[in-house]
Amino acid sequence: MSRSRYRIFEQEYPYFLTDTVVAWLPVFSYPAYVEIVLESWRFLQRERGINIFGYVILENHLHWIAAGPDLSEHIGRFKSFTARRIIDELEKRGFITLREELRYFKQRHKSDQKHQLWQEGSHPQQIQNDEMMLQKLEYIHNNPLRRGYVDEPTHWRYSSARNYAGKEGLIEIVTDWS
């Protein structure tokens, strides 16, 4: 039984997803860890048939819209893979304090691991129509703007706003979803 009330039931729909670092720690302030996420998304696109329609990565969480076969399973693998790679990289680079915080904030029931990067769940919300897709994309792209990080959504490097503005983004996304 899942610990979350959010589930993916209908595979043909895209889902709005949110993944948050435990205790909102600013792991993605370091570009190397953002690149691990981007590499993992590229793999999901290329090897697992996952379509990504939009994304934003902020210092302590990310939002993305995705669809594809076995999406729920692939989200779990994405989170497991990125957590392992990021924690290994933190150790390699000597980021002792951040690693200790990931150990301190680990859920008690996670007895099979020493650290926890991601909070549980991705809170999938099914996107049922074009209006909802536009609303979620606007939310994603304006997230850095609302936080005061940039003056224009396309100025945020780690976002699909550039793709939707006809510019080259960091990963390919599906912009023709209607």
Image (cartoon, rainbow, N blue to C red):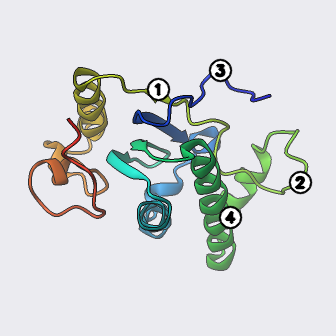
Q: Quadrant of the N terminus?
A: top right
Res 34 → quadrant:
bottom left
2 to the left or right of 175: right
Helix, strand or loop at disc 2? loop
Disc 2 marks a residue whose amino acid type is Asp
In the picture provided, is 35 more to the left or to the right than 160? Answer: right
Q: Residue 133 at what x, y percent from top left?
A: 28, 29
User: In terms of secondary structure, where does tag 1 sit?
Assistant: strand
The residue drawn where x is 58% and y is 56% is 78
Give, as a three-letter code, the residue at label 4.
Answer: Arg
Question: Which of the two discs, 3 and 1, labels the residue nearer the N terminus?
Answer: 3
Q: CA distance from mark 3 to mark 1?
A: 11 Å
Residue that label 2 marks: 112
Cα–Cα span, label 4 and label 2 = 13 Å
Front tag of 3 and 4? 3
On the image, numbered disc 4 is attached to which residue? 84
